[in-house]
Amino acid sequence: MNRWKGKTIITFSTLAFLLVLGCASTQVEPGAVAEMWKGKITGMIDGDIKFSIVRIAGENNSFSVKGNMDMKGQRIVGYGEGEIKCTIKGKIKNEVMNAIIHGRAVVSDGSADVSGTLVGTMSKTQAFGTWNLSHVGGIHSGEWTAEKTSTSQ
């Protein structure tokens, strides 16, 4: 009986540590500036993209990126129209962003969890790249362009 109790305590302690570590890594630094971007998506979804990101300074011209994204599709191949809301988490190094996106799609035919990537080149005012989203029904992909609309604290 004591053998299981010890393993349970170690398991829960490890899990608690990882949860705290995960929560600590998602916090935005005080005074961080959010960048607001707005643009278009094309490909298997035609519509609008809007996202905000916060850059957290790293080393060697590198930034961690966290934020939120909203895609509104007037045409989503195979699913009609709808909206996809995601979180963004990744890195920007030398103006190249590689980010993972996770969220939920609500379309004419129903809803599903989605995950994928948002990859692109980001200058101080303009950005473009490719996107893909995997979901229970398959994969959607295409291109995106955006312009920075504002910054806020």
Image (cartoon, helix red, strand yellow):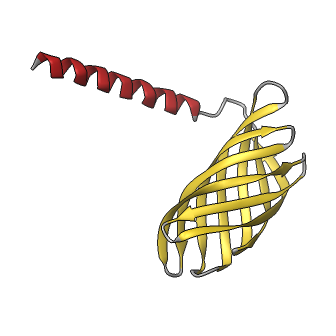
Q: Which residue lies most toward the left here?
A: 1
Q: Residue at the location (63% across, 80% down)?
A: 77
- Of the 4 image quadrants, the one containing the N terminus is top left
Q: Residue at the location (61% across, 62% down)?
A: 133
Residue 52's place in the image compared with 113, above or below, is: above
- Direction from residue 111 to residue 6 in the image, left or right: left
Q: Position of residue 111 (x, y in %)?
A: 48, 71
Viewer-nearest residue: 62 or 7: 7
Viewer-nearest residue: 141 or 74: 141
Q: Residue at the location (66% across, 61% down)?
A: 132
Q: Where is residue 145 in the image (x, y as percent from the top left)?
A: 83, 62
- Direction from residue 22 to residue 49 in the image, left or right: right
Q: Where is residue 126 in the image (x, y as percent from the top left)?
A: 89, 54
Give the quarter of the image for residue 56. Answer: top right
- Direction from residue 60 to residue 14 in the image, left or right: left
Viewer-nearest residue: 91 or 138: 138
Residue 118's place in the image compared with 45, above or below, is: above
How many numbered discs?
0
Q: Residue at the location (85% across, 50% down)?
A: 121
Q: Position of residue 113 (x, y in %)?
A: 49, 62
- Direction from residue 105 to residue 50 in the image, left or right: right
- Of the 4 image quadrants, the one containing the C terminus is top right
